[in-house]
Amino acid sequence: MTKKKVAFLCVHNSCRSQIAEALGKHLASDIFESYSAGTETKPQINQDAVRMMKELYGIDMEKTQYSKLITDIPTPDIVISMGCDVGCPYIGRAFDDNWGLQDPTGENDEVFKSVIKEIEENIKKLKNQIK
């Protein structure tokens, strides 16, 4: 059976979508392939996100991930928006889900942890839905 390809999208592909890609690979790689992308890129992944993911899960996102455009990833089966509070990327079709996550950029560690935990719960739910 071919694994579904899940794309996590937000505008800059530097924080929430990167966390979702990392947690998808960490928690659900047996069920689906995880990708993240944006309509714009940043020169580096959000450094607070990188630090928090190392602290919480021992995952070094900078080793395996970088900011990518939607055109840089394989065509996904499922597309999830991280939250359109900063404008929603247009991908030529409707999103399968919008997780409506707050962008933690510039916020304190507690806000980051809260958003990361929300992403973790959503990944687990998605894994059960796809199974």
Image: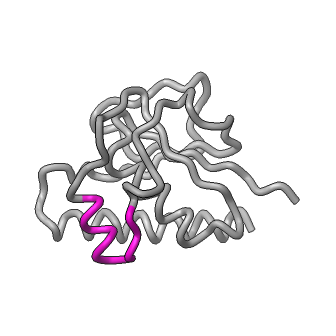
Q: Is residue 7 left or right of residue 76?
A: left
Task: Determine the residue positioned at 56% across, 72% down.
Answer: 27
For image coordinates 28% across by 34% down, the residue present is: 86
Asked if residue 45 is positioned above or below residue 11 in the image, the reply reads below
Which sits in the foreground, 58 or 36?
58
Task: Name the chief secondary structure element in magenta.
Answer: helix
Tally of numbered discs: 0
Q: Is residue 113 magenta?
A: no
In this rendering, is residue 83 above or below 101? above
Q: Reply yes or no: does residue 52 show up in magenta.
A: yes
Q: Residue furthest front?
A: 63
Determine whether 7 is above or below 62 in the image. Answer: above
Residue 44 x %, y %: 29, 42
Residue at 30% from the left image edge and 35% from the top image edge: 42
Q: Position of residue 67 (x, y in %)?
A: 40, 39
Of the 4 image quadrants, the one containing the C terminus is bottom right
Name above or below for residue 32 compared with residue 9.
Answer: below
Horizontal side of 63 relative to 96 (left or right) equals left
Query: What's drawn in magenta, residue-wise?
Result: 49-60
Quadrant for residue 83, please give it.
top left
Q: Position of residue 13 (x, y in %)?
A: 38, 40
Q: Nearer the viewer, residue 118 or 76?
A: 76
> Which one is nearer the viewer's eye here, 35 or 88?
35
Q: Residue at x 59, y 36 (%)?
A: 73
Identify the coloring: one colour
Q: Position of residue 49 (x, y in %)?
A: 27, 59
Looking at the rendering, in which quadrant would you find the N terminus? bottom right
In the displayed structure image, the side of residue 112 where residue 95 appears, left or right: right
Quarter of the figure with residue 11: top left
